[in-house]
Image (cartoon, rainbow, N blue to C red):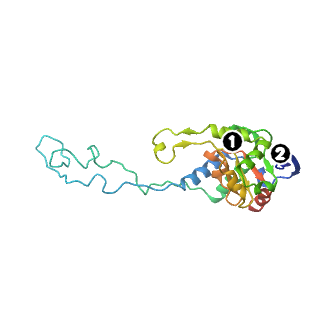
Amino acid sequence: MAKIYNLEGEIIKEIELPEVFNTEYRPDLIRRAFISAFTAKLQPKGADVLAGLRTSAKNIGKGHGMARVDRVPQGWAARVPQAVGGRRAHPPKVDKILWERVNKKERLLAIKSAIAATANIDLVKERGHIFDGEVPLIIEDGFEELSKTKEVYEVFKKLGLDKDVLRAKEGKRVRAGKGKMRGRRYRKKKSILIVVKDKCPAILASRNLPGVDVVTVKDLGIIHLAPGGVGGRLTLWTEGALEKLKERF
């Protein structure tokens, strides 16, 4: 049995969880399914076929006491990988296999396992989430009608979830390496996942909170449930979302 809370953080009733929450925890399948979903978004890239070859250099033959590589009239080498401005020895190729494929049944079992992991308090705390209370966290459907971010945050306070949002906010860091120059300057921590029944005002009201993701049952996937391929994300379910979860699984 699981407790259902109202917007004031009070227990109003108890319900029986869907059968999917009894699925065995399979970290191996969760990891595989996550890698498959993550790599499916990667875009193949390759070097220009003429990169490093746009030059008037030619081979001057032997007998000059220097390496027999293509040279420009001024005498310096061109085209070869070891020359300044030359082509790369092993450039990236568009035919490289990036997508890690996984069987449909395995992917489905991984999602079920990740859903069950959200109800395991030990796994949730292992991910570093900070909260007061029990899991799974279920709230009445009135939550879906909240239209302001401050209203959502007030509910988080009453449920003891505000500390985890602050943890995500304070965990924002500048990324190491060249990635900081490529549109992903900051590394951000993941906080609460909110699962709602259908499109609703709470989606817009919640998504601006640090680390918080909002998703409908229909769009729920391994990327949301197990960021980084590790199950046990702190998840807030609405009562209607659980009913729809029974239909999907």
Query: In the image, which disc is placed on residue 12?
Result: none
Q: Position of residue 28 (x, y in %)?
A: 64, 46
Residue ID at (49%, 48%): 183
Residue ID at (75%, 49%): 151
Please say whether residue 24 is visible from this viewpoint: no
Q: Position of residue 166 (x, y in %)?
A: 68, 39
Please say whether residue 168 is visible from this viewpoint: yes
Which secondary structure lies at badge 1?
A: helix
Q: Position of residue 103 (x, y in %)?
A: 61, 58
Rate crowding at label 2 as few (under 14), some (14 to 19) or many (20 or more) other CA atoms within 10 Å: some
| Residues at marks 1 and 2, CA–CA distance in whole angstroms | 17 Å
Q: Are marks 1 and 2 in contact (CB under 8 Å)?
A: no
Rate crowding at label 1 as few (under 14), some (14 to 19) or many (20 or more) other CA atoms within 10 Å: many
Q: Is residue 79 left or right of residue 179?
A: left
Query: Which quarter of the figure is the C terminus placed in?
Result: bottom right
Which secondary structure lies at badge 2?
A: loop
User: Of 100 and 5, which appears nearest the observer?
Assistant: 5
Residue ID at (76%, 41%): 121
Q: Is residue 162 left or right of residue 185?
A: right
Query: In the image, which disc is placed on residue 9?
Result: 2
Q: How many marks?
A: 2
Which numbered disc, 1 or 2, marks the residue that appears first in the sequence? 2
Q: Position of residue 162 (x, y in %)?
A: 73, 41
Tell me the amino acid under the disc marked 2. Gly
Tell me the amino acid under the disc marked 1. Val
Q: What residue does disc 1 label?
A: 165
